[in-house]
Amino acid sequence: MDRREFLKISGMSLGAGALISVAPAMGSPLGQKVRHLFRRQNGEDPQAFTLVQLSDAHVGFSGPPNPTGTKALEQAIDIVNGLKQQPDLILFTGDLTHESETPGEHAKRMQTFKDLTSRLRAKKIMHVPGEHDAALDKGVLYRQFFGDPNYSFDHKGVHFIALDNVSRGKPIVGADQIDWLKKDLARFPTTAPIIVFTHRPLFDLRPDWEWFTRDGHQVLDVLAPYENVTVLYGHIHRHDVHETEHAKHYASKSLIFAFPDPTTAGDKKPIAFDKDNPFRNLGLQQITEKRPLLVDDIELTLREFSGTNGAQQISRAGAFQ
Amino acid sequence: MKRYVWMILLAVVATAVIAQELKPANVVAISAKRFEFTPKEITLKKGEPVTLHVTASDRDHGFLQEDLGIDLDLTPDKASEITITPKTAGRFVAICDTFCGSGHGNMKMVINVVE
């Protein structure tokens, strides 16, 4: 085993969202050595775990792009519950609900989301808001149901950061949250593996579709000294992989409807509903014997020659479903 | 007599020059309501100053086109204005960047800048 093989992340097309598996190799003497190195540098040694990213369920939405309501979310929950190895974490990257201006209706939708997701066997469920959850009332209702829209925590050697780029009503993170981020990161060496999860892309994916965060570049500047940053986001209702100078960015598909390819489509219109294959473009797929689960090569490897030791970016050879 | 003629001519020329200097920029009126701007498309001339006079009729909206230096917050009780001088010809899409409901994602207008 060389150091590059010490820590790997596998991405599995499990049929709902993205399953990310962090798997450090700890059996060999070198594995133990690297593990101790991580513990000394980052405060916690990496241990094997998996997480699932789900996004954009839009509970309460009804319309031609998807007349099935919460069916895709419910099926995703069943699929995740059926995993032999239950994920340690479920990350929901925003637009849990669809807004409503009828008094009391949005709160009902948030409660429905909580009721449905309480069926998940995995109990560590983390959220960030999307604009449909939190932009109209500046996050007041969201906070009542889900707590703070931005926070951080450590899990088995990886530092997770939840960023809110919706509840100010505009696609911004804001100076106060950027200051908070600087302080939050201050205790970590640049080698720390970091996963940021947020709703909108932090880079300019397609600004005229509002697929951007106006001060996202400032966030990326703060993250720039860190060598091992992965950003998971939603909002765009399609899979996307993008690399900026210091981070890799992955978008998870939606659980309500899909948007077209922004590089070829003129207008941002949902892809039409297909009643014969209602979940075809969603972050949900039927797993059959003919279409078994696929394990893609995703690596979270050590930077052997960078002058520092740390976990490198997640890189995925295949697409998540 | 000649002296007076020259003075009058000078005054006329000076007035014309001052008038040119003080000539107000063209004003384009734009209104915003969920989930559209009116008009949907405007055309401006490169290098010519223009004032965009933008109103919102129903609720708060945004009016953003970063390449043209446009970034306005719109409220129903007050018109917002910005004067710009487009430096580059092209097609620019301005969007509402203050979330205003379900159709917000497609609330935009086109600003054409021609030579």
Image (tube, helix red, strand yellow):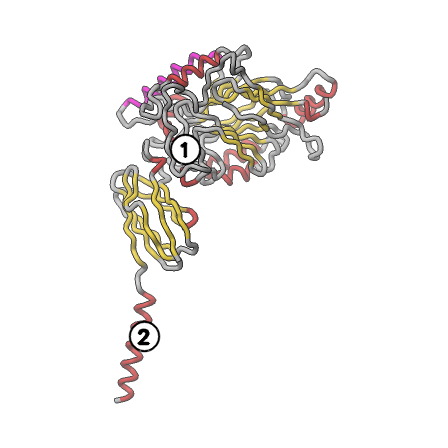
Tell me, yes or no, whether the highlighted magenta stretch contains residue A116.
Answer: yes
Query: Where does the magenta region start and end?
Result: A104-122
Say yes or no: labels 2 and 1 on the same chain: no
Q: Amino acid at mark 1?
A: Val
Residue appearing at x 55%, y 20% in the figure: A12
State the residue position of label 1: A166
Q: Amino acid at mark 2?
A: Ala
Rendered position, B75 above or below A291: below
Is B31 on the left-hand or right-hand side of A199?
A: left
**What secondary structure prevails in the magenta region?**
helix
Mark 1, secondary structure of its residue? loop
Label 1: chain?
A
Q: Position of residue A47 (x, y in %)?
A: 62, 18
In this view, the residue in front, A159 or A3, is A3
Occupied quadrant, residue B23? bottom left
Residue appearing at x 68%, y 21% in the figure: A35
Q: Position of residue B86 (x, y in %)?
A: 40, 55
| Residue A249 visible in the current orientation | yes
Occupied quadrant, residue B27? bottom left
Q: Position of residue A160 (x, y in %)?
A: 54, 26
Farthest right residue in view: A29
| Residue A212 visible in the current orientation | no
State the residue position of label 2: B14
Q: Position of residue A136 (x, y in %)?
A: 33, 32
Quadrant where the image shows the C terminus of chain B: bottom left
Dot label at residue B107: none
Mark 2, secondary structure of its residue? helix
Q: How many marks?
A: 2
